[in-house]
Amino acid sequence: MDPFESLRELDFPVGVVVTDSVDAVAHYGDTTTPYRWASVTKLLSATATLVAVERGMVRLDEAAGPDGATVRHLLAHASGVPFDSGATLSEPGRRRVYSNLGIELLAEHVADAVGTDFTGWVEETVVDPLGMSTVLIEGSPAHGATGSAEDLAVLGRELLNPTLLGRELYEEATSVVFPGLSGVLPGYGRQEHNDWGLGFEIRDHKSPHWTGQNSSPRTFGHFGQSGSFLWVDPEVHLSTAFLGSEPFGDWAVEAWPPLTDAILAQHAPLG
């Protein structure tokens, strides 16, 4: 079985790295050239925020963002702030409103708490400790990173076997926060249970979705409008990083789920 069959007719470069919790187990395409991560950047920002929580510099339930919202609300896209600008759309905790602005407000809050600019904090606490040498963050903490698929896979490996976060906080971050909230998953429409953790989108039973039909409900990660994704499936101890030069579109909707299912069929441990 060729797990990359769904990619072979694409007429633009992509890079894919499949990894377990120790090392890469499969590569496809150009995995060393930096590409735009777009919203996959949020995984870096979330992890750096959680490091600040782990170190006691930030608390999840302290006020941040609009009135009544907390760090927890901002991480979980439940603060009610809009996608990028404008008035607050709902009370905190009532709707899942996916928001770049919310992550930017979160970054400002964390920067104030740790006493340095947020990009520097991400580099100091996540990028440099993990040795992600190609990663560059310019502009928004919601969508401004570039880096190689190899380095995105390093982050996936960390999220399979965390060293930067304690187990208790990691389990909370990768479980559903504010369960039962509905909202729009960009590119895939309204989901009655649009589940998120603390910065990580939770697969659960969403349909349609960018992961595979056989992805476990515990799968978490993010995809980006640059045509990027990182998923982590803790049930089978696998993660896959995908980057390329073509923006998200119909090609991704068609190619990504069979790619994921083929990777799981090929590399997931039996039993």
Image (cartoon, rainbow, N blue to C red):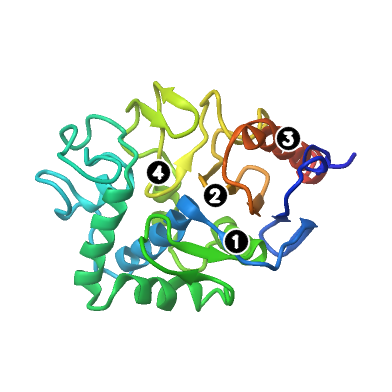
Residue that carries the numbered disc 4 in the rendered image: 197
Of callouts 1 and 2, the N-terminal one:
1
Residue that carries the numbered disc 2 in the rendered image: 226
Asked if the residue under mark 2 is in contact with the one under mark 1, i.e. CB atoms within 8 Å, the reply is yes
Q: Nearer the viewer, mark 3 or mark 1?
A: 1
Q: Is residue 132 visible?
A: yes
Could you say whether the residue bearing mark 2 is in a helix, strand or loop? loop
Residues at marks 3 and 4, CA–CA distance in whole angstroms: 23 Å
Could you say whether the residue bearing mark 4 is in a helix, strand or loop? loop
Q: Residue at x 70, y 39 (%)?
A: 260
Q: Residue at x 42, y 24 (%)?
A: 191
Residue type highlighted by circle 2: Ser
Residues at marks 1 and 4, CA–CA distance in whole angstroms: 26 Å
- Please state which of residues 235 and 83 is positioned toward the viewer in this rendering: 83
Q: In which quadrant is the N terminus drawn? A: top right
Residue 217 x/y as whole percent: 55, 33
